Image (cartoon, rainbow, N blue to C red):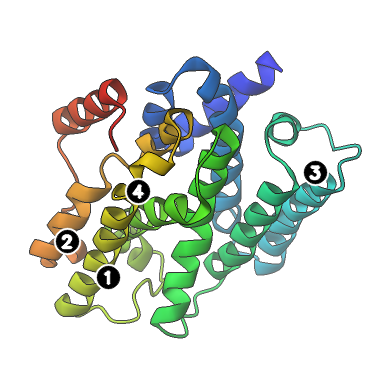
Amino acid sequence: MEEDLQACGGIVQKGDPDRFAATMAAKPAARDVLLPVYAFNVEVARAPWVTQESMIAEMRLQWWRDALEEIKAGGIVRRHEVVTPLALMIDAGAAEVLDQLIEARRWDIYKDPFEDQAHLEHYLEATAGGLMQVAAQTLGDCPADIARDVGYALGVANWLTAIPALQEAKRVPLVDGRPEAVVALAEGARLRLRRARARRGEVSRVSAQAFLSAWQAEAVLRQASKDPWRVAEGLLGMSEFSKRAGLMLRAISGRW
């Protein structure tokens, strides 16, 4: 188990350094829960990008869906450095949420644009929102809609930050790239974050550690809303000092 957790930590540290930093700011017991969940997310997120063959990418995602089915069944689970500890941390309900995350990730395989704004928002809801729900609820008591609101806000912030890279990869990441549409997307995410914060009292302190991963979301969304041109220019984000200071403050205060 210890070796598996170390392997999960290495995967997250390399593939998602900001989320790794947030995990390291959590309590040691929370890290053991979060690292397998986040390692799963890294592996699934990169599966569509490691090959140009869509069929191979589909097979890679299906492998993870099959693993989740084993977890949901509650029987023998395949031996794997991520799947094995993940099976010890999550229940069947969480596995179903992660399965929906994988289904949404199938969009990453192809170069088709989103069908409409609702499709984009569903993608962000299923991926970022679903991941946050699993992370928070696996740690402790947290209403699903609160976790999904925080996760969605983080997802939009990360998505807007990644726009230049996605476009370079020949993807069409936005249904409407006009400044006013970018502002609307960012403001919608900020509204959901405020809605979640208004219900802080319903989230246990243990579960709230999952929300450390969203420590930059408000600042990034505010930048995109105020200066939407930053999105296309790849100029969203906080300075390294601000990132570290902000994470430390939230870890100490427990405020999100």
SS category of the residue bearing label 3: helix
Q: Would you say 27 lies left or right of 48 here?
A: left
Location of the N terminus by quadrant is top right
Which numbered mark, 3 or 2, is in the foreground of this view? 3
Q: What's the amino acid at mark 1?
A: Leu
Residue 234 is situated, as x and y percent measured from the top left of the image, at 20, 56
The quarter of the picture where the C terminus appears is top left
Residue bearing mark 4 = 199
Residue appearing at x 45%, y 49% in the figure: 147
Q: Quick one: which residue is furthest to the bottom in this view?
A: 115
Q: Name the residue at the left extreme.
A: 226
Above or below — where is 47 with respect to 56?
above
Q: Position of residue 177 (x, y in %)?
A: 25, 78
Per the image, label 2 sits on a secondary structure element best described as helix
Q: Nearer the viewer, residue 192 or 83?
A: 192
Callout 1: SS: helix
Sequence order check, earlier mark of 1 and 3: 3
Vertical placement of residue 86 versus 96, above or below: above
| Separation of marks 4 and 2 at Cα, in angstroms | 25 Å
Measured Cα–Cα span from mark 3 to mark 2: 39 Å
Residue pictured at 47% horizontal, 85% vertical: 115
- Where residue 247 appears, as percent x and y from the top left, is 26, 29
Disc number lying in front (4 or 2): 4
Q: Which residue is mark 2?
A: 224
Q: Please name the residue that numbered disc 1 is placed on.
A: 185
**Precedes in sequence: disc 4 or disc 3:** 3
Lower position in the chain sequence, tag 1 or tag 4? 1
User: Which of the numbered marks, if any, corresponds to residue 71?
Assistant: 3
Amino acid type assigned to the residue bearing label 3 in the image = Ile
Q: Which quadrant holds residue 107? A: bottom right
For residue 240, say whether it is visible: yes
